Structures are given as structure tokens and as C-alpha cells.
Amino acid sequence: MHPKSAKGSRPTSPIETPGHSRDSSISSGKERHHAPLNPSNLRESRLPSTSPESRMTIPGTAAERGETSSARDFETGEGRASPGAAKPAETSTTQEGRSVEGTLSSSFEQAVRARLVHQKDSDHGRGAETEGSQHGTFSPRPETSRSYGSFHSGIIRDGFGGKYPGGMGDGAGDNQSETSALLGDAIVDGVLGAPAGMKTSTTNYLARRHGIRNRRFMYLAYYIPIVNWLPQYKWSYLRGDFISALTMASFYIPMSLSYASNLGHMPPINGLYSFVLNPIIYAVLGTCPQMVVGPEAPGSLLTGEVVRENIKKGTADDENGQINAEIAGIVTFMAGGIILISGLFRLGFLDSVLSKPFLRGFISAIGVVIFVSQLIPELGLTAVASQAGHVSHGSCVEQIVFLVRNLGKSHALTAGVSLGAFAIIMVLREMKKRLQPRYPAVVFIPDRFLVVVLSAILAWKFSWDEHGLEILGKVQADGAIFAVHWPFEWSHLKYASDAVNTAFIIALLGFFESSVAAKSLGNPHDPTGEGLQNIHISANRELVALGVANVTGGLFMALPAFGGYGRSKVNASTGGRTPMSSVFLSIFSLLSALFLTPYFYFLPKGVLSAMISVVAYSLIEEAPHDIAFFWRIRGWSELGLMLLIFVATIVWDIKRGIAIGIGLSLLRVVRHSTRPRIQILGRVPGTSDRFENAEVEPSLVEFIEGCLIVKVPEPLHFANTGDLRNRLKRLEDHGTGAAHPALPRVRNKEHNQNVIFDMHGVTSLDGAGAQVLYEIVSSYVERGVRVFFCRVPTGKGRGVKALFEASGIVELCGGERHFVNSVQAALRMTEIESLTQELGAAR
């Protein structure tokens, strides 16, 4: 025993002990409160203070100051320190038997008392101060009630938000009522208000638990994003949103006229409608603040394909702009309806079905088709093409043949103006691209708008239309402006049958391009807090927003409009930060449609074609990069798919090209999802509990005699269990799944006396998968093979283990003793059962 130190002096022992005792606490009522002299730094790190003043530490140890730890008394009712003077210091005996006496100074005493009382209030009722608790260095620390989320929440017992006590299982939807499962939490809680007697959803439970009162507004702000972002709007955003909208209007208003006239084969003003209606609707319902929707070249071309098909059949005419606009409205309405229904049924995951090679091959082919088709008006061969039949509406190969044969008949003035405009735009485009890193302001230069204005002025000044140059002419609607037309009149059903397939393709491509743009732009979290907050990208809500916008556009006979990555990047780079830039763009487009269309009269059609050719070039220019990438990684299947779709689209037509591409993409998805990925495991030498894939590097693992260890690293369902039996047969016969089934057995049957399934990766199992697994186990048992399962996920309800029990697999294997927690334990069980069998045979 160490000698006692004198009062106010340091202990003489070379081993110093803490200046407080674990037992230096007194009881108050039914609780015992611990008041250490030096609060643990770990405790402070778990409970961040709200002000610098609350972070008070006491310099030195108690022994260094000649002080002892004293028991402090606290009131439990209000959580305040008891009034009056501190109690006399008590003698505290250390573990070594030494006693140190002393008292805290009044200032430090008050600080420590206030600190611990504040901590007690925060942790009250959560097990921090139960009767008989002793909080030493290694004792459990009290939990904090601090919340750093969007909403201030009260007590969180764990880091996962808490578990709904009424839940029936571990799955996400296990605690839902039948009504919630059918209608969703948003309808049941947000619209119906969680009727009495209905099982509480997890969302409703957590919202009530953390004090979120207006739950209906919570859902409203989520599904109608303008309710969320409009109250956050600041005057500081106005300048950037206004300038970006003005910049986009100067680029894309003339472009929309080109899309409608040259690609959609409809009146030019109907292309302008897409910028009047769709951006403002997306601003209300869309989830990506900086994305701007509008007509795109592929969608406009596909819409024009439907119009061309009807012109070929004689049900439409190039000169009848009203009928052509109605056909385009049908296509737009149907595409919007497909998108909207997909969003309501939560099919947003479909944007992952189409692979990047498929899209690159198709979009590159679209670029070539557009570029070739625009050469006819650019060279002034429109009249010659009309005399030669429907060359303008033929395939890309037919148009190339026509251009080669009639190149000498080109109109010199038209070719000069068109190709000159194309060259100027391309040069300015490249200059802006190179100068922008050093001079960001060059992005504001409206180069295409200047080319359009200059060409219109020159055509008016020199009367180029009298010299054979085709001009846009009077831009107006065939009828009242912004006239609403119901697409599905009885007389229009003959057009609808041709539009269904094309509308589906437009919807698929449009959504994918919008999804890529939304994911690329998103709503980057602004650490300064200056940007919009609580904006979350959702594929399903994007589908709804785009669907509503295009259904509305179809009623006004507009072109299909989706989010464009290039246009949205222009918006972001010119200062657009919120959806208000889309609102301004709609306003500018509306003003142009009402007041500025007469000024487009002298705009040369060849210049519009040149602008579209620039867009077509941008669709093609990314292909070499993707081709080089897949070539470098030897992605021959991706390159083959890209080439096949490209050739089919160019040689055949767009519809058949994309049909081939979608079919091949779906086949690849199905093939990938139905292929089992089971592995044969071997033990790592020198260890007893480490097992690795034996097919990766067989020399680095050791074989365990008489045992086949199979790891199932994925959920089992009807799709991937169909071929599971054959895959297991290959592992039994060859020791690998890579060998061809024609190879005779090379693995001895004695090595398959025990089959161990590591089921750790089987997070879910459906009924069909359980049936196949039962048949496999039954086959093993009939052959006298012992079957063991390890690391089977357990859970309530329809968990994996529950399905094993219900299907009879547990009983078939030999009971619960064949279900263990590790491969090592399963190997021990094989030894035990082998010895038991040998002893039984010896008797």
C-alpha cells in the first residue's frame, strides 16, 4: 500500500492515479449521479458544446492542485444544481489505497456543476443515469440528443433514425398496412391524413417522433418542388437567371424554328410553342433546378418521320401545315402520356436499361442522318428533290445517292450562304470553347443569334429571295395562335396507329437524355448555404414532370421537349441557378411568338439548316472518344453493338435501327440477370477462418478434402435459379464453373461428400428460388451427400431463414444443427458427423 500524501502535495508514488473515484457519487432519490473532477475528453467529444464558454476544462489534475473529488448533489426535477453552498469535501480512496483531500474553488465548482447538469438534462431518461450506474473510463457513455439534420429532432437512440415498434419485419415495407402498400405513404399520410385505426407507416411514425407537424406540406413540397424552392428565392439569383434565360433565348428560339420547319415538317411557330410551355411546367414540377427542357434534334426528327410516313401514304401533305402540326401533336401527346404513366407507376429505374454503347451508336447515327438530310436545303436542291419523288423523306442512303448524282445542280447563292453560315458558327464555337477557360464572359456572346440576324438583314438588304434564295417567310400558325387541339378525334385515329411506336422511342430517348443531364447537373450541395436547399433528384418525379409538360405541349401541337445536357450547361455557365431561368425563357419565347415573328420573315432557310448541321456535328463528335475507350479496354461486344445499331439506322431506317438496339440491350440485361454467380471457395493457408474464391488464383488457397464449399453472393430469385443446378454440377465435376460441360468428370466424387453453402450474400429469396433450392438439396440428400448452410440471413416475416423453414429445407438437411454461423463451424460439423457415422458403423 502506498503511503498517504500530505494535503496539498503530490503523491510520492511513481504511478499517479486519477484524482477521482468511481465511487464518489451519492444517491438522490432513485438515481445516483456521477460528478468526476476531470470530465473525460471522450465525453466532451460526444457532446459538442453550443458555445465556447461551455467548453470549460480544469487545468492540471486534482493531485497537482492538492484537491480531492467531491460528490455533487443535483436536483432531478428541473435539472438545476441545488442552491446553497457546496457540501463539505469527502475523503476519496483510490484503488491503491491512497486518500487525497481537497475542495474545488467556487468558480470551477460552478462551471463543472453547470456542465454536468446540462449533460444530465440532455441524457435524462436514456440510460445515462440509472440506478447503480458507474461511469468509469470504459463505461458506456451517455447518448447525445443533438441533431444535425434538416429538422431538429429530439431523441435518436441510434444512428438510423429509430425503428418503428409496430414493424412486422426487417424489410422496408414490412410495417406497412395494405392501404399504404397499395397507395403509398404520400397518399395515405399526405392526402388522407393517416386515418385512425390504420397501421402507422414508418414515415409518419418518424415524423411524429421528431416533431414534424405539417406532414401534408412535407409531401406537397416534395412532389411539387416549386413549393420548396420559391420561398427560398433571393434577389441575388435574379441577375444570373435573367441573363442565362436571355442567352438561351438568343440561341434556341431560332433553333426551335429550324427543328419545326426542317425536321418536324410542320409550321415553324409550333417549334416555338415547346419553349413557351414546357420550361415553365418543368419549373413547377421538375427536380433539377438548372435543367432546361425544350425540343431536341432526335425527337424532332422522329416526329418528322411520322409526318413523312403519312405524306408518303397520302394522308398528309407538305403544303398542309395544319394537318402536319396535328400529327406532331399526337406524337407529342402520346410520348408525354407514356412518360407520365411510367412516372406514376415508378418506372424510373428503366433509364438503366439502355447501355451507353447503344445510345452512342444510335445518337451518332441520328447525327449522320440529320447532317445528310440538311445538305439538300443547304445546297438549294429542295425543288430538285421534290421532282425526283420523296427523296427528302427517304432513307439516309437514298439521300446520299441523290446528293452525289445532283451535286452539279446546286444553287450557288443558297450553298454559299448556308455553308458560309455553317463555317462561321463552327469557327466561333471552337473559339469560344478555347477562350472560355481564360475568359469566362465569352459564353455570353450570342454567336448564333448574331449569324441569324446578320443573314436576315443581308437577305432583306440585297433581296436574295428574288435571286432564288429560300427564306422562312411569314411565321404564323395555321389558325389561331396557341389553339388547343384534342389529339384523339375520330378522324385522327388513322394517324395514332403510326405514332405509337415512334412515341415510345421518343419517350425512351428523351427520358434517358434528361436523366443524364439531371444526374450530371443535379443540385450540388453548396457548403456556403447560398444555393437552394433540400432539392433531391428523383427519376420518378422527373418522369411525371416531363410527362405533364409534353401532354400539355401535345394539346398545343408542339414538338416533344425534354431536358438537353448542352442547353442546361449553357444555362448553368451563364449564371442560371434556379428554375426561375426556365420561367424567364418561357416568357421570352411567349413574347417572341406574339410580337417578334414578323422579323423572322427574311431569315434564310439554309441558315436554319446550317444551325441544325452544327447540332448534328455535336451528336457525332463524341463517338470517337467512346470508340477509343472501348477499343482500349477490348470491349468487343460493346463495339459490335454500337456498329450494328449505327449501320442498321443508316442503311435501313431509324425505327428499325432503334428496335434492333432495344432488343439487343434487353437480351443482354436478361442474360446478365439470369446467370448464377456462384463461387467455389478454398481456405487461405495458415488460417482457419479465411476463405477465398478458388477460381481466381487456385495456387493461393488450399483444398479441403471431402468438402465442396460453394458461396452464393447474390439474392436468389426465379430468374437466376433456373440454371443453378447445372452450375453446381460443373463445380462438382470440374471444380470450376469455367469448364465446358462436354469435359468428362475430373473431380473425384469423394470430394463432394459434404456440400457447404455460404449464403451470406443471399439477402432475399423468392418462392421460385426456394423451390429450386429444395430440389437441389433433396437431390444431394438422396445421394447421401451431407448439406450444410452457413451465414443464412435471418429476419421476421418472409426472411430467407423463414422461407428455408417453411419450404422444408431445414428439416431436409438434418435440422438446425446444419445451419451455422461460419464456414469454419460448418467444417467442424462435417468432422463431427463423419466421426459419428464411423462410430455408428463400427457398432
Image (spheres, rainbow, N blue to C red):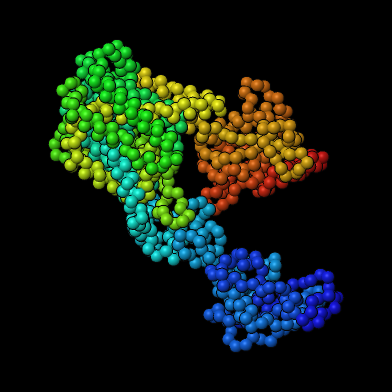
The one of 676 and 565 positioned closer to us in this rendering: 565
| Rendered residue at 48%/64% (across/down) | 153
Is residue 838 shown left or right of residue 206? right
Based on the displayed image, in which of its 4 quarters is residue 346 positioned? top left
Q: Is 229 above or below relative to 12?
A: above
Residue reaching furthest to the left: 479
Q: How many numbered discs, if any?
A: 0
Is residue 812 shown left or right of residue 636? right
Based on the displayed image, in which of its 4 quarters is residue 789 positioned? top right
Residue 66 percent coordinates (x, y): 75, 79
Q: Is 526 above or below relative to 396?
A: below
Q: Is 251 above or below relative to 35?
A: above
Q: Is residue 136 visible?
A: yes
Residue 57 percent coordinates (x, y): 64, 72
Based on the displayed image, in which of its 4 quarters is residue 308 positioned? top left
Residue 84 percent coordinates (x, y): 60, 88
Is residue 70 shown left or right of residue 353? right
Q: Please state, as top left, top right, bottom left or bottom right, where the C terminus lies in the image.
A: top right
| Rendered residue at 51%/63% (across/down) | 147
Residue reaching furthest to the bottom: 84
Residue 539 percent coordinates (x, y): 40, 44
